[in-house]
Image (cartoon, rainbow, N blue to C red):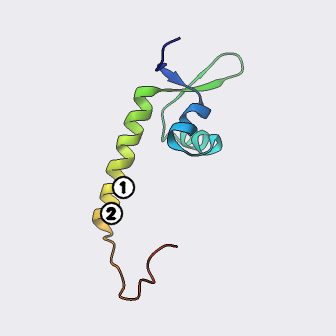
Amino acid sequence: MPEDPRFLTLADVAEVLNTSSAQVYALVRRGDLPAIKIGGRGQWRVERVQLEEFIQRMYAETRQFVDQHPFIESETGADRPE
């Protein structure tokens, strides 16, 4: 078996993204993360290249958000998350 398989399970993707399988399933079902359904049970698989493209899109979207919503520290520090 190759060290870096072409296709990943939703659990594999969840591990890479450090999130839950349920969150990955939601990303797939919304169409945010392209995936295929295989086999009689309809198991989901995400191609590794699609995952990497998704991650790059999220970086770009985050950069755009940050650019449009600059972080401004208040003098008291009340705007900082705990």
Amino acid carrying label 2: it is: Val
Q: Position of residue 54 (x, y in %)?
A: 41, 39
Residue 20 vs residue 75: left or right? right
Q: Position of residue 81 (x, y in %)?
A: 49, 73
**Secondary structure of the residue carrying numbered label 1:** helix
- Name the residue: 57% across, 39% down: 14
Residue 48 vs residue 20: left or right? left
Examine the image and state in which quarter residue 74 appears: bottom left
Q: Which mark is residue 81?
A: none
- Name the residue: 36% across, 55% down: 62
Q: Which mark is residue 66?
A: 2
Residue 15 vs residue 68: left or right? right
Q: Position of residue 43 (x, y in %)?
A: 65, 24
Q: Are there few (<14), some (14-19), or many (20+) residues within 10 Å of tag 2?
A: few
- Name the residue: 36% across, 44% down: 57
Residue holding disc 1: 62
